[in-house]
Image: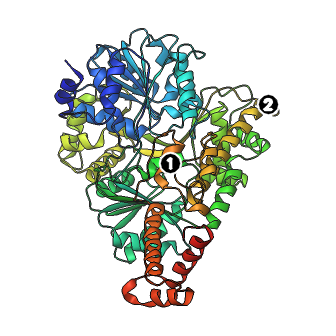
Amino acid sequence: MTPLEALKRWWGYDSFRPMQEEIVRSALEGRDTLAILPTGGGKSVCFQVPAMMRDGLALVVTPLIALMKDQVQNLEARGIRAIALHAGMTRREVDTALNNAAYGECKFLYVSPERLGTPLFRSYLDVLEINYIVVDEAHCISQWGYDFRPDYLSVGELRKTVDAPVIALTATATPRVAEDIAARLSVDPSKPSFNVLRSGFERPNLSYIVRECRDKSGQLLDICRGVQGSGIVYLRSRRRCEDVAALLKAEGVSASFYHAGLGNRTRAERQEAWKCGEIRVMVCTNAFGMGIDKPDVRFVVHCEPTDSLESYFQEAGRAGRDGLRSYAVLLWNASDLAHLRQMLDSSFPPLEFIEDVYQKLHISGNIIYETGEGFSMKFDLEAFCKQYKMRPGMVRNALRYLEQSEHIFYSEDTEFPTRVRISAPRNSLYDLDLPHPQMIPLLEALMRGYPGIMSYSVPIDEDSLAKAADVTVPWLHQLLYLLSLEHIITYIPADCCSMIRFRHDRLMPGNLDLKPERYMFLRGNAEARLEAMEGYVTDDAEMVAGGAGSTGAAGGSAGSAAAGGVCRSRLLLKYFGQEETEDCGQCDVCRSRTAEERVKAAIRRFFAAHPGAGPAELRAFCADPKNGLPPSATLELWRRMLDEGEI
């Protein structure tokens, strides 16, 4: 079977997207392959096709639980066996899943990176027939990357025991990050062996627009009214998401909001409503959008600059995946840049503060010194900060650094599925006087669908259970609750919360190694990324190049805003290492330059027809409505042309 035949058989496509086939063939040749594809470039096909063409299963390492579940569902719908291991599963569930992966004709095993180092997972390595090690979001393994996660370093360790080629994929890697990924994932880091395949990052249908403005609400309304189709509006603050969504709705725009503070079911319902067009505009934090493949998004608006061009490029790239004209708009003002600087400071709280948070975490978990390794607990950030009178933002960033310095594992969005155990004896179930007739088919569906439910609590798929019992999901919740009141079942409703797991026993004060050198290194990287973001919004090519770790300019006919501006697309492409670029002709800079050229041509024609005319005559010419020239701007441009010797 050829790659194209495999693509047609399992995915129904007649052809590959650009660069996909080259990546697939590189993997089939057994070469370690690093694929750098833009958002929406079809990364999953690049590893799924070769995995289906080889015996064994692909081990897919990804930090995105929602994406993991979505891909498993898509593969299962195609008749391909896939299993996912993620936070929120008990040890028994993980053991069962690994057993099924080893002996159940499984083709894809999705795991979160923190699973790789656990003894239970490693005990199965000898019986898992792994054909490829797939590393999704591969930039997470690089300390130069914007989302470094130390758990990803376990992939490099895995190569010492698993003899399988690597397929690494990312949408956001500068040349420096790509080089670091290859080194960290190579069998011999001193001699990286990766075949690096980079797709062109141009999006000719996507217009990048940057607007400096004070009235962002007015600008946003103009965009929503002026551009047809669905859109995404990104903000950092959860409260602001709710306020802006309310404003849009009050102005007649179909809108809703989405952030990590909402319940799991609410988020799923809103995401689905947006995907199917019931909601036109989603106002959200960056918790929304990852793994969503909605092709007809016509605009993405950022109401503030992001803290890196990597995250901006990824989020903006969710617009126009169907190839039709779309817009990526960034609204900013000087206070936004000052706020980004403040955020950088709060993102790296003092090391003394971080150690204080470490100790208070153990206190809140009642963990004494020299104990606690592997202990997991649910974590309520708001309650913790209230108890210890700390600022939530600083605590959240302290937790992230404790994770990066390998002291804890911290997950802000861990899903715990509904769990049920039938506690009544089996032989008495049919003799019970149940308060509702639908409880009988529900109990039968539970016993048929979930072996072991009489002995221990098991995770329940609410949608499939409701379908099997012929009830709605809300009524299923009510029936389960009533059965628990009758002491027939033990019912633990689904939950979504933060979770902390301790990597080692609690250390005495002063003994915590917070790796100050790494702290300064990571802060320096963050400052460089922030500088690149500032360069993008202010159209300073040298700042963008410096943030990417490049010594060259960003290219183009001009190197700075003062000289006429650099195409937004060229700035972004250069940042990600694409040397050969052309002006897009669609961004705000290119459009401004085109308009300027039209005015220059009009000035030349005027003086050719009126030799010896001066500013007064030019002003009168501009004032004539049929000429359509702005007087003050035209006069200023005429003087600049004189100064530069153009006329």
Residue at figure coordinates x 67%, y 47% from the top left: 527
x and y percentages locating residue 69 in the rendered image = 35, 36
Quarter of the figure with residue 48? top left
For this view, does 253 lie left or right of residue 215?
A: left
Query: Residue 289: where, in percent of width, then height?
Result: 40, 50
Residue located farthest toward the right when viewing the structure as drawn: 510
Residue 107 visible in this rendered orientation of the protein: no
Whole-angstrom CA distance, mark 2 to mark 1, is 47 Å
Q: Where is the N terminus found, in terms of image quarters? A: top left
Residue 40 visible in rendering: yes
Q: Does dot 2 land on a helix, a strand or a loop?
A: loop
Kindly state the secondary structure of the residue where label 1 is placed: helix
Q: Which residue shows up at 66% across the image and 28% down it?
A: 372
The amino acid type, in three-letter code, at marker 1 is Leu
Given the image, on which type of amino acid does mark 2 rest? Met
* Residue found at x 24% / y 38%: 443
Q: Nearer the viewer, residue 311 or 440?
A: 311
Mark drawn on residue 572: 1
- Residue placed under numbered mark 2 in the picture: 508
Q: Residues within 10 Å of mark 1 (few under 14, many from 20)?
A: many
State yes or no: discs 2 and 1 in contact (Cβ < 8 Å): no
Mark 2 or mark 1: which is in front? Answer: 1
x, y percent for residue 283: 43, 62
Q: What count of labels does the image hold?
A: 2
